[in-house]
Image (cartoon, helix red, strand yellow):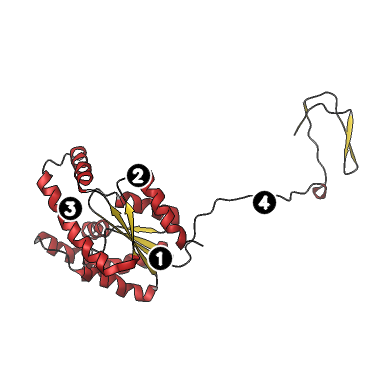
Amino acid sequence: MLISKISPSFRVNNFNFGAQRQNQRVSFLMPYDTVSFTGKVQEDKKPELKEKTIYIFLGAPASGKGTQAKKLAKELGIAHISTGDLLREEVKNQTEVGLEAQKYMDAGELVPTNVFKAILVKRIAQDDCKNGFILDGFPRSEEQAVMVDELNKKENAKIKVIKLSVDEDKLVDRMRSRALIENRTDDTPEKLKTRIANYNAVRDILINYYGDKVVDIDGNQDIEGVESQITKTVQEDLK
């Protein structure tokens, strides 16, 4: 410890200490019971959910739902689940479920809900889903929403749908920029608008299905602005 302008001697708990000059670094030993520390070390804690919660992120292509879903998952310490990523992993590993899914994909058909169910059952059984998890871009139909509810009967979790609303012109601009970065020359304005229209049809079905569980977020803002809105709406779910 550094003591400035020290006096020739001083006492601590009946121990005498001498010093020769000012601004001298003084080292000494004393019995363990002569010094006590009563302060508390504060540690940063992750937010904790009051109850197990399933967050469903709903948003058009380029709405930023993937980015925001990952951010929230990290903040809450829960799993971020992209069924598309899971499906591709199953196909890559040639699992039984993956081989079943590949048959439909090779035929240009939609993968059936029961295949997604098999993938989800396995994923949500993992430890990082015990307090809740985030479904990114899933469900995409009422049938899939019903399936998620059926799975949730055992979990008995709260469901909250976070819908990112972005103006169509802004979505098209974002998708064009992303297409240029990824060198996707097939993404014409007409195709981009078709993808948005397809999403809008699914969105309306799911909004009708989930009703007051849907929270509308203005996704036209920058990443930080959207994240701030999501953080506010999640506050009510925390201890």
Q: First in sequence: mark 3 or mark 2?
A: 3
Q: Quadrant of residue 106?
A: bottom left
Of the residues tagged 4 and 2, which is closer to the observer?
2
Q: What's the distance in space between the residues labelled 1 and 2, CA to CA?
A: 23 Å
In this picture, residue 15 sits left or right of residue 55: right
Reading the chain from its start, which is encountered first: label 4 or label 2?
4
**Closer to the observer: label 1 or label 2?**
2
Residue named by callout 4: 40
Judged from the image, the secondary structure of the residue bearing numbered disc 4 is: loop
Q: Residue at x 30, y 54 (%)?
A: 164
> Pointers 4 and 3 in contact (CB under 8 A)?
no
Of the numbered discs 1 and 2, the one sitting upstream in the chain is: 1
Indicate the position of residue 201 as horizontal and vertical percent values: 17, 61
User: Would residue 228 be seen by someone viewing this image from the given angle?
Assistant: yes
- Label 4 vs 3, first from the N-terminus: 4
Secondary structure beneath disc 1?
strand
Q: Residues within 10 Å of mark 2 (few under 14, many from 20)?
A: few
Q: Label 1 amino acid?
A: Thr
Q: CA distance from mark 4 to mark 1?
A: 32 Å
Residue underneath mark 3: 196
For the residue labelled by badge 3, is the local secondary structure a helix, a strand or a loop? helix
* Gap in angstroms between the C-alphas marked 3 and 2: 20 Å
Q: Crowding near pointer 1: few (<14 within 10 Å), some, many (20+)?
A: many
Q: Of 21 and 56, which appears nearest the observer?
A: 56
Tell me the residue that label 2 is attached to: 223
Q: Residue 133, labelled with which disc?
A: none
Answer left or right for 169 relative to 150: left
Where does label 1 land, which residue?
53
Q: What's the residue type where badge 4 is placed?
A: Lys
Q: Earlier in the sequence, mark 4 or mark 1?
A: 4
Give the Cα separation between the discs numbered 3 and 1: 28 Å
The location of residue 227, given as percent across then percent down, is: 38, 49
